[in-house]
Image (cartoon, helix red, strand yellow):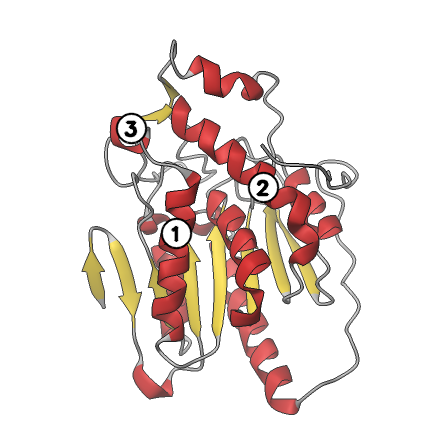
């Protein structure tokens, strides 16, 4: 195991079955996905979890970072994963799921599949569109981290949420959501039934927008937003391993008839149709 500025990586050598590229969420750091990574390592997978620019520091530092920098770091980490010579999957929590989706839109040929946990593609904050202006009069707002049902667990995040970085995150969604149809890789989604940060309907919108033939969704009944540290974490971990093993087995067996998408449990209302349109 190697650690650099709170990044972590597990390289199992030539015996590894595949590599998982894990991406943490907004204002957080790789510690939020470390138990997930450790489980994957123990199941025989390499793991790379980069620290996104501006994260793992003060909110003032994060305020200077942009979604383009976050994506660039993830794409750089994809190169590191490909260099290990094994099939590569991408997984993400919250904004990490947003970035993983963007990676699949642009670099889908390099991915064997996606695993998303409470992924974000839009929000319902009524005044969120004002963030680019509010950043000048309200540089930060209270922290959004540690939305966990477990009372004795805390997520490591910035002390406050920088509005400028949030405005940049909204730009990532505006770019990614209209192009969800470019996502064709197999997809596994885990969605908390109760999430105080990302509305569960985000998962339904993503499922409706992608063109993946193999899509499976699981509702997490006992966890809040940071589900990788919450009561249903084991469901995510074992489900990820099962999904990755299944995709690898399918690849070994050769082409087969397209699988139909598994029915999705109705979480947070009916799915919302993806938007289409030009980006700013």
Q: Which residue is mark 1?
A: 72
> Residue at coordinates 66% horizontally, 49% vertically from top-left?
179
Q: Is residue 249 above or below residue 26?
A: below
CA gap, disc 2 and disc 3? 24 Å
Tell me, yes or no, if residue 121 can be seen here. no
> Residue at coordinates 31% horizontally, 79% vertically from top-left?
12
**Residue 59 percent across, percent down from the top left:** 29, 28
Please, what secondary structure does the residue beneath circle 3 have? helix
Please, what secondary structure does the residue beneath circle 2 have? helix
Please, what secondary structure does the residue beneath circle 1 have? helix
Picture quarter with the N terminus:
bottom left
Q: Is residue 61 above or below residue 55?
A: above
Q: Which residue is mark 3?
A: 59
Q: Which mark is residue 175?
A: 2
**Residue 266 percent across, percent down from the top left:** 76, 44
**Quadrant hosting residue 15:** bottom left
Marks 1 and 3: which is nearer the front? 1
């Amino acid at each position: 195991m190697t650690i650099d500025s709170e990044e972590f990586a597990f390289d199992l050598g030539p015996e590894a079955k595949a590599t998982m590229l894990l991406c943490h969420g907004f204002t957080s750091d790789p510690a939020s996905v470390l138990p997930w990574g450790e489980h994957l390592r123990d199941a025989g997978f390499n793991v790379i979890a980069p620290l996104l620019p501006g994260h793992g520091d003060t909110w003032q530092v994060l305020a200077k970072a942009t979604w383009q920098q976050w994506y660039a770091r993830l794409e750089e980490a994809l190169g590191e994963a490909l260099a290990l010579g094994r099939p590569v999957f991408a997984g993400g929590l919250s904004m990490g799921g947003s970035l993983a989706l963007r990676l699949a839109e642009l670099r889908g040929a390099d991915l064997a599949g996606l695993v998303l946990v409470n992924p974000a593609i839009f929000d319902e904050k009524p005044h969120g569109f004002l963030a680019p202006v509010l950043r000048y009069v309200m540089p930060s707002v209270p922290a959004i981290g540690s939305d966990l049902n477990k009372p004795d667990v805390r997520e490591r995040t910035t002390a406050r949420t920088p509005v400028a970085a949030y405005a940049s995150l909204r730009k990532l969604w505006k770019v990614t959501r209209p192009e969800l149809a470019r996502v064709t890789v197999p997809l596994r989604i885990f969605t908390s039934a109760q999430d105080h940060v990302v509305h569960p309907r985000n998962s339904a919108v993503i499922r409706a927008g992608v063109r993946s033939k193999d899509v499976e969704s699981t509702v997490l009944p006992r966890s809040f937003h940071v589900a990788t540290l919450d009561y249903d974490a084991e469901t995510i971990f074992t489900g990820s391993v099962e999904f990755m093993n299944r995709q690898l087995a399918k690849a070994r067996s050769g082409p087969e008839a397209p699988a139909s998408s598994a029915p999705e449990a109705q979480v947070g209302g009916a799915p919302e149709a993806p938007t289409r349109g030009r980006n700013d």
